[in-house]
Amino acid sequence: MNFDDPKDMLTAMVKLRGSTDGAPCLWWYRGLQYGVIDRQPTLLWQVEGAQLGKYVQKDDGSYDHIFHDVMFYLDAKTSELLEEYENPYTGETNAPPVMRMGPFTNNHSVAGAQIQLPPNLPAGAMDVNWIYEPVSVIGQHIFIRESATTKIMNPAKGKPGASDKDYFYINDFFTLSGRLSDVENPDVKSAPAQTSYTSLNEWTPWLGMGNRDGAVLGRGETVKLASYEDLPTRLRGWIDTREPGFFEDPEFALWDQPYHPLNQ
């Protein structure tokens, strides 16, 4: 495969992130998030979650990626589920929510990626600039880099302790990796893969930081799994008790569910 060819790069990306035959793929992720004020980071918490998605090829050769996530906040040291959180900046106690993100549909083509707005999200509420970056191949290792800047309507504006900004900016940087032999094998539809990521976002709204200067820096890792049972036992327990049925629909009848904005 020639990864300078946008068609080959797109095929490689779909094989690693999903499956070229449209089969659903489950990802596990875990990371750390830091508050940053005056360029000084403070570890806030860990996050752990899962994403279920699938790639559906269209007549024009592009792929629709349909996916949704569920994520939990964990204590920075003990890794236990956070029921309450004492804000180190304000001294106030907050209740971290379970994060439900999506459903979203991204269209990936040789020209780039475009996100489709959920039908009950107002026009202009979200704009995403998704960029493919150069592919690297080292021996049998392939790395595909992407970055995405999202401008999204502030879901918490008007609530106590919330910023009065009209929009938030969310910046995500991904490095998707796997084995070159899997990507180049025509019999492999879904290649084993992992991702490292970094994010630089506005203050998480539930933290109640108002209009204080600063940001949240995140970093973490993700792994593609073979089945729901491969998720860590405790994560499956949290999903089954707090978000039952979240990942039960392999055909993604997701538009029937209410939309939950990022970081609400």
Image (tube, rainbow, N blue to C red):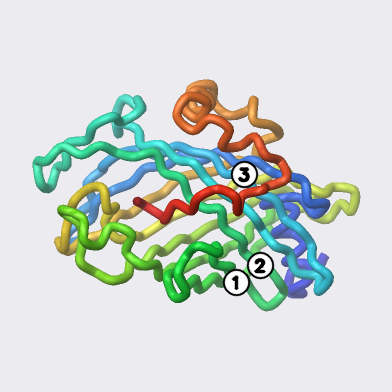
Sequence-wise first label, 2 or 1: 2
Q: Are marks 1 and 3 in contact (CB under 8 Å)?
A: no
In this view, the residue farthest toward the bottom is 111
**Residue type, numbered disc 1:** Gln
In this view, the residue farthest toward the left is 91
Above/below status of 194 relative to 118 = above
| Secondary structure at numbered mark 1 | strand
Estimate the x, y position of residue 177 in percent, counting from the top left.
Answer: 64, 51
Neighbour class for label 3 at 10 Å: few (<14), some, many (≥20)? many
Say whether residue 85 is left or right of residue 130: left
Neighbour class for label 1 at 10 Å: few (<14), some, many (≥20)? some
Which residue in the structure is indicated by mark 3?
A: 52
Sequence-wise first label, 1 or 3: 3
For image coordinates 50% across by 50% down, the residue present is: 258
Which residue in the structure is indicated by mark 2?
A: 107
For image coordinates 58% across by 62% down, the residue present is: 145
**Residue type, numbered disc 2:** Asn
Name the residue nearer the viewer: 39 or 59. Answer: 59
